[in-house]
Image: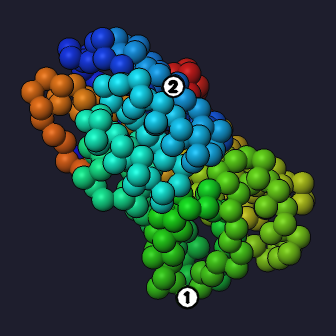
Amino acid sequence: LLVSAVALTPLGAWAADKTVGFSQIGSESGWRAAETTVTKEQATERGINLKFADAQQKQENQIKALRGFIAQGVDAILLAPVVATGWDSVLEEAQDAEIPVILLDRKVDAPDDLYMTAVTSDTVYEGEVAGKWLVDTVAGKDCSVVELQGTTGSSPAIDRKAGFEKAIADASNIKIVRSQTGDFTRAQGKVVMESFLKAEGAENICALYAHNDDMAVGAIQAIKEAGAEPGKDILVVAIDAVPDMHLAIAKGEANATVELTPNMAGPAFDILDAFWADGTLPEKWVQTESKLFTAEDDNQAIYDMKKGLGY
Ligand code: AHR
């Protein structure tokens, strides 16, 4: 089941009067903030009472929030897990309490009978799309790549690295020369890019691959401050397709991004509607679309459109 970023969501007939707990990671990126906004909007439209808990990037806070939701007897839980491991016990507690848990945008390393389903993109594929774009763009020329990884231990950081490496595996002209976490934030993206530029020299870096757009936008600033031209001297490819990245591509300061829809909650609430209506169980993975945007798209128009939607 592939969910489009623009799929319309029917108003839930069964969701009204239900209480759903949402354990969100935090607000590390523009994408994350958009996901929070969309989830709240989707809940309001459907008459769902959403209990929102911001974990400030800490797994322990997420586990506490989940235990709180279980104690309150919520009807379902949405979990965006900050890291992949360490969830078994609390998921077992939810299962014992017969509260369905739906994972949003990230996966966990736990038996899949401990959650109802995961609504996520194919994060390995996202890395592959970014890597393939670079292979095609440099067309055989030597290219030293620096990589900004997402949060250590998170499923998208692990998968986006693996996917990119897979895509460039047969391209002996492309080498990752530096790779470090920037924790999915704009500020860390800038700091780590500054260290890459210092260590390698801007003239020796051909491309930046960032696991999200916010880190890329921070890195673009670092590249400019180092006196080089992002998007030209150093190619920039990332993931999310947030408005600021479309703007950077429109200005010629970035080259490509892979879209991740912030609407993970719409499909999740549809699944809960069906379950509450007649017990229908979803597949274990509901995959959202991953679309590549490049300078060939009208990025200024896309920026305006996404901004207009409050993204
Ligand atoms: O899990 C999705 C990732 O988390 C997004 O790509 C990133 O921006 C966010 O912080």
The residue pinned by badge 1 equals 172
Relative height, residue 187 to residue 135 (above, below): above
Q: Residue at x 21, y 17 (%)?
A: 14
In this image, 308 relative to 43: left or right? right
In contact (CB < 8 Å): disc 2 and disc 1: no
In this image, 126 relative to 17: left or right? right
Q: Residues under labels 2 and 1: Cα distance?
A: 47 Å
Mark nearer the N terminus (2 vs 1): 2
Relative height, residue 33 to residue 28 (above, below): above
Q: Secondary structure at mark 2?
A: strand
In x, y percent, where is residue 158?
51, 65
In x, y percent, where is residue 55?
60, 37
- For the question of whether residue 82 can be seen, the reply is yes
Q: Secondary structure at mark 1?
A: loop
Q: Amino acid at mark 1?
A: Ser
In x, y percent, where is residue 308?
55, 20
Relative height, residue 6 to residue 179 (above, below): above
Instruction: Note whether ligand 1 is within 8 Å of mark 1.
Output: no
Choose between 243 and 25: the one closer to the eye: 25
Q: Amino acid at mark 2?
A: Phe
The answer to which quarter of the image holds residue 300 is: top right
Give the number of marks. Answer: 2
Q: Residue at x 84, y 66 (%)?
A: 195
Which of the numbered marks, if any, corresponds to residue 180? none
In x, y percent, where is residue 71?
42, 28
The answer to which quarter of the image holds residue 246 is: top right
The residue pinned by badge 2 equals 52
Q: Residues within 10 Å of mark 1 (few under 14, many from 20)?
A: few
Q: Residue at x 48, y 60 (%)?
A: 85
Q: Residue at x 74, y 54 (%)?
A: 189
